Amino acid sequence: MAGGSTIIDHNSAVSRWTRDGARLPLILGNKYEIRFTQDGGKAWLAFTTGTLVDVSFELWFLGNDIENTEDDVRMMPWINDDNGNDEFDFKLDHLASSDTNDPYSDWIYFMMPNNDPQPGEQDYLDLIAAMEPDPTVWPGEVEVEHIARFVLMNWNQLQGSGGENEIPETGSTFLIEFPNPVIAGVDEFEFSSKVLDTTKYFIPPPEKFALYQNYPNPFNPYTTIRFDVVENSRVQLIVYDILGQRVQKLVDAEYSAGRHSVQFNGNRFASGVYLYQIIIDEINTGRKFIDAKKMMLLK
């Protein structure tokens, strides 16, 4: 969906998203994802207080090949805080709806973390680190906007058990595609009361516990560690130096089924090889999973 009250067909929606077509050269042929994850991320209230806020989703640029994940880039969300409460949320009812039960989100802007982004999420993490001392000041890099004024509609949420402010559940992923040029009179759509088939983009729970190699590796100073959880489990993630001395416990909490990620900040530590070990205790069955991997900090 697009923000604003003038969205009556596909052309007007695309016009809003692309600033009257100015962004089309950037986005045509490409794909994007909104991933609602347990860890979420940060977004910038660019049009109101200029602060960083927690959001429950990640934005990703997938390029033109969804199967090739090696060139995916994590994007920086800008938020237009529509109701001025300094957080990302759903509220009121979207004017595109004919009823009064479809809350819509604050406006989301898909921004590259800099004007020459590298695959992965390191550029995003570096941008967050640069902004944290004074979030009201955007760093010197020229940001690149791909999609503007995008909103999510909590379609018919109030007819069910959920509330107005209920966001999509963890693990939900929305794929946005711009495969072809928009042709007037052809690429139009209508609102429908039919239930959409969401299984195409549903991410099933992992079939087995797993610990993945950190990325990037080597790193300086940030890296991301991902792991899979099959069922509700108690998870510990601990970093050791090469001598086996514990230097930091990154995680000690309960996690639901899904793929999760944790960021490690090596600012306080010397260059060298470190080990990270995961211990997963499944709550219902008592199953245990233990694994460890090496990573290298280069300063």
Image (tube, rainbow, N blue to C red):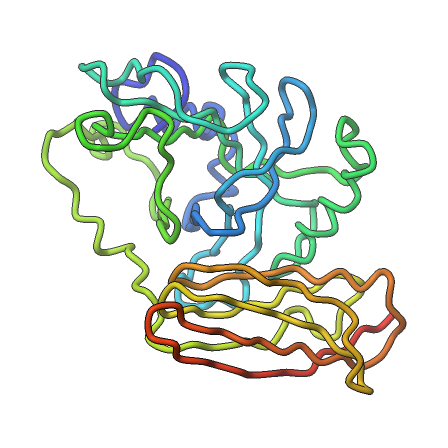
Q: Is residue 297 above or below residue 148?
A: below
Q: Give the quadrant of residue 134.
A: top right
Position of the N terminus, as image quadrant, is top left
Q: Is residue 270 left or right of residue 148?
A: right
Q: Is residue 278 above or below residue 10?
A: below
Q: Position of residue 32 (x, y in %)?
A: 44, 48
Front one among 141 and 95: 95
Q: Is residue 101 above or below residue 59?
A: above
The residue under the point 40% across, 72% down is 282
Residue 177 visible here: no
The residue under the point 75% across, 67% down is 248
Extreme-left residue of the structure: 194
Q: Give the quadrant of residue 122.
A: bottom right
Front one among 260 and 35: 260
Q: Is residue 228 left or right of residue 125?
A: left
Q: Position of residue 297 (x, y in %)?
A: 80, 73
The residue under the point 55% across, 26% down is 87
The residue under the point 55% across, 15% down is 84
Front one among 63 and 3: 3
Q: Position of residue 93 (x, y in %)?
A: 31, 16
Q: Give the quadrant of residue 191.
A: top left
Front one among 74 and 168: 168
Q: How many marks?
A: 0
Position of the C terminus, as image quadrant, is bottom right
Q: Is residue 174 left or right of residue 191?
A: right
Residue 202 visible here: yes
Q: Position of residue 135 (x, y in %)?
A: 75, 31
